[in-house]
Image (cartoon, grey):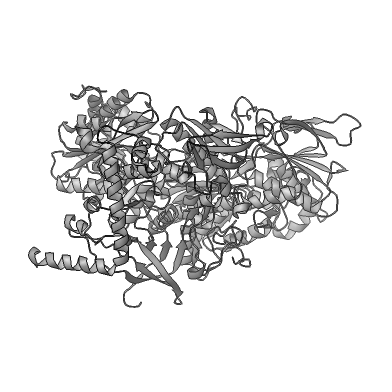
Amino acid sequence: MAEGMTQVDVIVVGGGIAGMQTALDLANQGYQVALVEQEASIGGKMIMLSKVFPTLDCCSCITTPKMSAVAHHENIRLMTYSDIQSIHENGEGFVAEILMKPRYVDEDTCTGCRQCEYACPIDLPAKFDLNLGAHRAIRVPFSTAVPQKAVLDIDNCLFCGKCEQVCPVNAINFAQRAECSKIEARAIILATGFELTPTDAKQEYGAGQLPNVVNALVMERLLAPTGPYGHVLRPGDGKEPSSIAYVQCAGSRDKTLGVEYCSRICCMYAIKQAMLLSGALPLADITIYYMDIRTFGKGYEQFYQNAKAMGIEFIKGKVARITEDEDHNPVVRVELIDEGSQVVERAHDLVVLSVGMLPAYDPQPKYRVSLDKRDGFVYVPSPNLSPCLTDRPGIFVTGTAAGPMDIVDSIMLAGAAAAEAAAYLRAYPDTQGIDTVREAVHA
Amino acid sequence: MPKKANHGDEPRIAVYICYCGGNISDVVQCEQVAKALSQQPNVVITRTNMSMCSDAAQAMVEEDIRKLSVNRVVIGACAPALHEQTFRGTVSRAGLNPYFYHHVGLREQASWVHHDDSSGATEKAIRLMMAGIAKARLLEPLEPIKLDAKQHALIIGGGVAGLRSAWDIARRGIKVSLIEKSPFLGGHMAQLESVFPTGESARALLGKLIEKVVSHPNITVYTSAELVGVKGYVGDFQVQIRQQSRGISDDIAEAALQAPLPEVPDEFNYGLTQRKLIYRAYPGAYPAAPAVDWYNCPDGHLEVEINGQFVILENAPKTFDLDVGAILVASGFRPSEPRYGEYGYGELPEVITLPQLIRLLALQKSGDKLIWNGHPVNNVAMIHCVGSRQIEGIHEPQPDGQVNNYCSRVCCTATLQAANELHKRFPHIHIFDIYEDIRTYGRGHEDYYIEASFNKVRFLRFHVDEMPTVIHASKGEQRPVLVQVKDYLTKGQEIEVPVDLVVLAVGMMPNPIDDIIRMLKVSPGTDRFLLEVHPKLRPVETAVPGIVLAGTAQGPMNIQESCAAASAAAAKVAVLLGQGRVELEPFIARVDPDRCTGSGQCVEVCCYQDAITMETVSSNGHKIRRAVVTPANCAGCGVCVSVCPNRAIDIQGWTLDQYEAMVDAIAADLPEMEAMA
Amino acid sequence: MSEKHKEPRRAELLKQLREEHHETVERTKALLKTQKEIRRQICQATREAPKSVPEIAEATGLPAGDILWYLTAMRKYGDVIETGMCGEYYLYQRVEEAKK
């Protein structure tokens, strides 16, 4: 082992729900795990959500304990705000070069008291709230962040020194520099997650220019108790909407966007949000325009039927166009398939685009795994029997890096990746999956 | 017996009320609850928080314990099932015995059930919290019961999920015994020809997996074997297995297959063909030896003529025991059987199920015409959601009185896969796909839908309250059957489709496993599939420690999902047994020997084997009879407590004194409060 | 090292950093100036009485969406509170004025 090299059994890339779960499932078996997350906190997309289907548990009730367990686990080395620079093989496994980005805050001394954040004079759009709210140039990423440590955005800093003046533990360190470290591991699990299909790609839906047409993750933030407004308001002018419409498959099953596949989660999250909205705004009318309702998971169909019984309106029809009227109310042009296919225009206060999933990250250059040329997610040569195997031995994939899936399925696949990697670590020569790896499809 | 409490004996209680991200605070006025509790005796701090389970809030609890010398913690939050363990970990990190923690379920018991009564829910929350505080005063430090675990798992079911988890567990260095009820491994996957989304041969994939499993030194496979008894607990279950005889020795195996014998419908082909009473389920099946169908041989005898000689084959089932640390249930599904007359099923010979069509296509491997019922098929109607997505009041219930109100996940893609194969092999066939919603959700599945549209499959969409009807065509019609659909893709037109074959895309139902459910004490959900503890927190575990689920026993899944679930279940087994030790909750019976008079009533009522026994002990030179608890066998049910005439038995962590204190606190006057708005 | 000695060194370091990051500092300074001006206008518009987003937008001539963003930021850091609702809109006011 080289000087300054940390040795673990597995590196997990990505600290969203899949990465956290697979790290925990390995660590609980006694394996040493390094969990590397590029953001300043773990939690991924899931921690941004309000409540989760089909149980309607508050999302932080499911996510934050897992975040906490990861942070406290004796077998997990958590590295946030860190990028993997390169991966190479050393005969026994992989060596990862990791760059820990400077927080300009001493992580060991910072207590997360947020006094620096209050002292900082500049407001910036907060990524965690999808730019609806603000945070400061120095801030704790969000209220339930792990680690609960401040991070400074140096590119938007005035170097006024106010944070330094108020910090009770002298944790601010403008001289901090990025640090490099090396980790040696026998296996790697990619849990690099997804991004949303962009709302500006679709000209017919306003190309992202209509202020009261938002994507569904924005609605998650609006519904979350920690959300930017504290209420469901439309971002264009702060009006409490009394008529809200969902446009399904806005970014999936759409050849014009190059996304022909189904993103699997949108039907359920739209129904869930509709239910939460009818709780938050009991007088609001909620409409879901859909092509097919795909509530296929355990308990999901009953969830859909409950939503119908609650009075949420489901309308079969593909929305052709969204424009707006003079009051910036979005106007939806839709063919009502169940009503003789007549084409109508309907105005709503707020329109939510049920956007789909795209891969968040291209692991091909660094990890030399192939991508599936049809959907761009990590290629899985034998998806049926070995859903976590990539075409490179020792590198596994889990969660939405392996294609769209919901949280329940991600957690299941995270367990599967942990089992697959654990078996690989023990039976080193038995590296192949059950079936011969088919010819890789390179993107 | 209780050890000395941390931080001295005077209770210093920290009380927290969780908003639960609005789940509690939207109804219960949490600040008011906190205020009401702050003046209670022994309470040193009361706080509220948006999310107590967050790392920051847990750190706050730890700091309170250290700085305020807190020695008891009470948190009002979600159900204990969710986060009691989380907070035990928190107090433990701060150096406190983890059982100095008490969890009050405000979400389930106050806010969710009384969401229309804020002040009532708030009052109830205060009372529940007061009861929690009263119990906390009397908490004692406890230690989990540590037991050795057998590094050996029992897997019930030899389908793809059972096989996949066997392989994963074995590769982790843990022994596996896999039992399969039928004489052959492979389950329903063996009945498929090609699998979506890759188009690979199902049998070839399965064959490789079976080969890996049966050649692994850690795995023992028992076919024709079933579970008949279970004793013990996580780490140390004693399971009893009964295995039927194979019945045929290897030397006469091939000759036995040729022997003239009565025939029965072949379940492998869903009754489309017949098979003999000595059979091999499919070419290449494992084990290769043919099996005798004892189910259809009354008395367990079969007389058969082999090579000109009459031989009597006998079934001599053997029963044996295994000691295992965990049990994995992979008992699988069965295709739902349409009701007689449902879409003409059973009445019209032209109505078959999708699994039957898949076998039909496999049986008619060549030829340019698909033949059914002696006639070439030109028009096919495929109807979705048969036995799935049923709605009470619209669909007739299943024989058990329930409707299948769930989606079966696999049928849409499987139907379109079959439609595309029909088109490819018999391009002249017109295919009509009659559906409510097309759910080709999986990776690569949408391609089957796109391809089907490209293949000119005609889609007709019906509303669930206007279901299609399947009737016999009148005499002289070219096609024997007429399907009538109100089609909402063409403005609600009433369309009549004349067809030669109707294919019902039937859903999944769990295999009938009432005996296993009873023996293992696991619970099915309202959909009859086995129930996990929580879909996100503990997705493969049952409420019984040491018993995990894999595959379609838990709910409809396709092969990929079954394998993912199987591996996840294997990981859980590895976590449980990998260290060779398990920990059990210490909530078990405890006998006070000074109060026990040896009445023996506790032993009489105990439902668990050897959990409480009468033993002779010496006391001041006298031999006396006293009740003694064996911790590993006690489930902590408390039946013994209720019958003891001397109040000599308590459940640790839930003592009678604690209950009485809780009841008193609930019934007490509410603390002085400002008007409850 | 005593606090006395540390102060000048800190000031020196900050000055040096401002020079090093000249470009982003200048941009951020300009942004801060704009933000201060908009916050001032919002405070002025709500001095007499709490107002809704469209009302403030009309008074200041700024887009309603921007006003909402500023109010959200000011609320988060405790400068502004919601005082109630008027029709479908919430009303906002500076904390000091609202307390009066």
Residue B222, position in %: x, y? 58, 53
Q: Is residue B629 visible?
A: yes
**Quadrant assignment, res B271:** top right
Residue B279, position in %: x, y? 73, 51
Taking the view exactly as shown, the residue that stands out farthest to the right is B476
Horizontally, is A275 left or right of A344 in the view? left
Depth check: give the residue in front, B270 or A171. Answer: A171
**Residue at image point 30% right, 62% down:** C26
Quarter of the image with the N terminus of chain B in it: top left
Vertical comparison of B305 with B387: above or below: below
**Residue at image point 23% right, 45% down:** B61
Q: Is residue B245 visible?
A: no
Depth check: give the residue in front, B161 or C1. Answer: C1
Depth check: give the residue in front, A392 or A340. Answer: A340
Residue A247, position in %: x, y? 55, 41
**Quadrant assignment, res B580:** bottom left
Horizontally, is C81 left or right of B578 in the view? left
**Residue at image point 19% right, 59% down:** A164
